[in-house]
Image: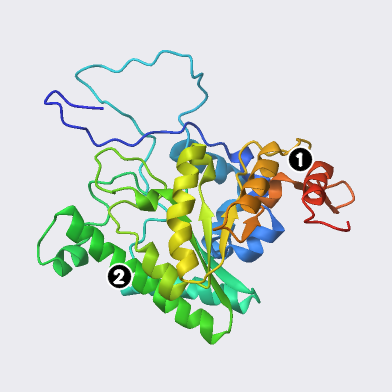
C-alpha cells in the first residue's frame, strides 16, 4: 500500500475475525493449559474467564470486525481512512525486547518455571504468531539508540538487537546447564534473508541480526529446523544445506520439524511420509520432530487419548514404531 508520493504506508494486515468459541473450551477452560500457562493463573485473568459476558465483549471489541464474507465489496473513502481497527492493545504478546535486563529476567523466570516442572530440556523458538508488523518502529528502542550512539542504520541496529537476544540465550544456557538439562534452538529459513526490506512480512521480530551460527557453535546442544511449509522444495534443500553444513561442522544433531498444515486425524498423512523420506536421505539431518500432536491424537468419549491409525501405519512403515 503506497501513498500519493509513492512511499510505502505503514499498515497492519488483518487476518479476519477471531471468535471466542474457537478458543474457550480448548484454551481458557482446558485443565492442562491452566496448569502450564502462567498467564491463565493470574487472578484478574481468571475472573474474566469465568465471566462469559465479559469474555464475549472482550472478543467483540478487541479481536473481531464481526461477521463478513470475503466476497463482499468494501469501499473506503479516498479522503478518509485507509484502514480501520476495533481497538488498539497497549502491547502485543511476543513484543518484549531483550535489550532490557527486566525482559531477559522475565524470560529466564519462564525457563526456570519449566525446569522446576521437571522437563528434560528447553526448546527456544524466536518465530511466533504475534510479533509486531511495525518493522519501521520495533527494535529502535531508546536503549538500542543509546548503544548505537545515535546511529539508526539497519546494520548497526540489527547487530545490537541480535547481540541482546544472543546474550539472553547465553544466560538461559547457563541456567539450563546448572540443572543438567538440554537446550534446543530453532532455526527458521527467514534468518537467512536480509531483514531491512520495506514491507517484509515475517514471523520473526523485525530488525534483528539472527546470529544463528554463534548459537549453533556455542549455545545449542541440538538444533531444530522449522518452516518447511513456507518453502518450495528447491529452496528447502538449499536452506537445509546451508544450516546443515554449519551444524555438522559443530558436531551437533540437526532435527527436521514436520509440517502440520493439512494434518487431520483420519487423513493419510502424505506430507509426513514425504518428510520422513527426506530425513532418511539428507546427510545433514539426524532426526524428525512430529509436530503438532493435536493433529494426530484426540481424546475419545472414555477420556482416553487415541492416536490416528493412519499415523501409526506411517510410523510402522518407516520402522519408527515397532509395537503399539
Q: Nearer the viewer, mark 2 or mark 1?
A: 1
Q: Residue at x 56, y 67 (%)?
A: 253
Question: Could you classify mark 1 by the number of other residues whose Cα lies within 10 Å: few (under 14), some (14-19), or many (20 or more)?
Answer: some
Q: Is residue 235 above or below residue 142?
A: above
Residue 265 horizontal side relative to residue 101, left or right: right
- The tally of labels here is 2
Q: Nearer the viewer, residue 312 or 141?
A: 312
Q: Nearer the viewer, residue 268 or 80?
A: 268
Find disc 1 in the rendering and name its residue: 265
Q: Is residue 300 above or below residue 4?
A: below
* Sequence-earlier tag: 2 or 1: 2
Find disc 2 in the rendering and name its residue: 100
User: What scheme was used to colour the molecule?
Assistant: rainbow
Q: Secondary structure at mark 1?
A: loop
Quadrant position of residue 24 = top right
Q: Residue at x 49, y 19 (%)?
A: 70
Q: Which mark is residue 295?
A: none
Residue 112, given in percent of the width and then of the height, sits at 53, 77
Q: Is residue 30 above or below residue 270?
A: below
Q: Nearer the viewer, residue 252 or 289?
A: 252
Residue 121, given in percent of the width and then of the height, sits at 59, 73
**The N terminus - image quarter:** top left
Amino acid at each position: 500500500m503506497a501513498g500519493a508520493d509513492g512511499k510505502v504506508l505503514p499498515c497492519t494486515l488483518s487476518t479476519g475475525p477471531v471468535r471466542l468459541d474457537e478458543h474457550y473450551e480448548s484454551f481458557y477452560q482446558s485443565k492442562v493449559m491452566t496448569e502450564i500457562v502462567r498467564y491463565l493463573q493470574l487472578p484478574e485473568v481468571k475472573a474474566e474467564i469465568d465471566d462469559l459476558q465479559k469474555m464475549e465483549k472482550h472478543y467483540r471489541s478487541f479481536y473481531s470486525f464481526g461477521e463478513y464474507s470475503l466476497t463482499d465489496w468494501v469501499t473506503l473513502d479516498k479522503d478518509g481512512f485507509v484502514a480501520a481497527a476495533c481497538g488498539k492493545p497497549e502491547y502485543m504478546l511476543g513484543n518484549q525486547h531483550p535489550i532490557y535486563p527486566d525482559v531477559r529476567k522475565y524470560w529466564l523466570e519462564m525457563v526456570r518455571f519449566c525446569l522446576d516442572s521437571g522437563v528434560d530440556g528447553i526448546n527456544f523458538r524466536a518465530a511466533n504468531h504475534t510479533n509486531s508488523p511495525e518493522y519501521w518502529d520495533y527494535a529502535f528502542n531508546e536503549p538500542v539508540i543509546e548503544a548505537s550512539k545515535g546511529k539508526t542504520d539497519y546494520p548497526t541496529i540489527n547487530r545490537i538487537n541480535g547481540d541482546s537476544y544472543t546474550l539472553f540465550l547465553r544466560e538461559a544456557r547457563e541456567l539450563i546447564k546448572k540443572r543438567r538439562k538440554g537446550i534446543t534452538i530453532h532455526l527458521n529459513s527467514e534468518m537467512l534473508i536480509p531483514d531491512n526490506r520495506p514491507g517484509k512480512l515475517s514471523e520473526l521480530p523485525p530488525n534483528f541480526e539472527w546470529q544463528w551460527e554463534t548459537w549453533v557453535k556455542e549455545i545449542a546442544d541440538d538444533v531444530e529446523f522449522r518452516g518447511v511449509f513456507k518453502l518450495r522444495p528447491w529452496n528447502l534443500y538449499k536452506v537445509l544445506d546451508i544450516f546443515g553444513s554449519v551444524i555438522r561442522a559443530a558436531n551437533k544433531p540437526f532435527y527436521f520439524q514436520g509440517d502440520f498444515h493439512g494434518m487431520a486425524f483420519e487423513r493419510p498423512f502424505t506430507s509426513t511420509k514425504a518428510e520422513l523420506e527426506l530425513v532418511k536421505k539428507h546427510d545433514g539431518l539426524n532426526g524428525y520432530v512430529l509436530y503438532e500432536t493435536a493433529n494426530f491424537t484426540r481424546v475419545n468419549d472414555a477420556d482416553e487419548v487415541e492416536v490416528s491409525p493412519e499415523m501409526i501405519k506411517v510410523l510402522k512403515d518407516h520402522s519408527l514404531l515397532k509395537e503399539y
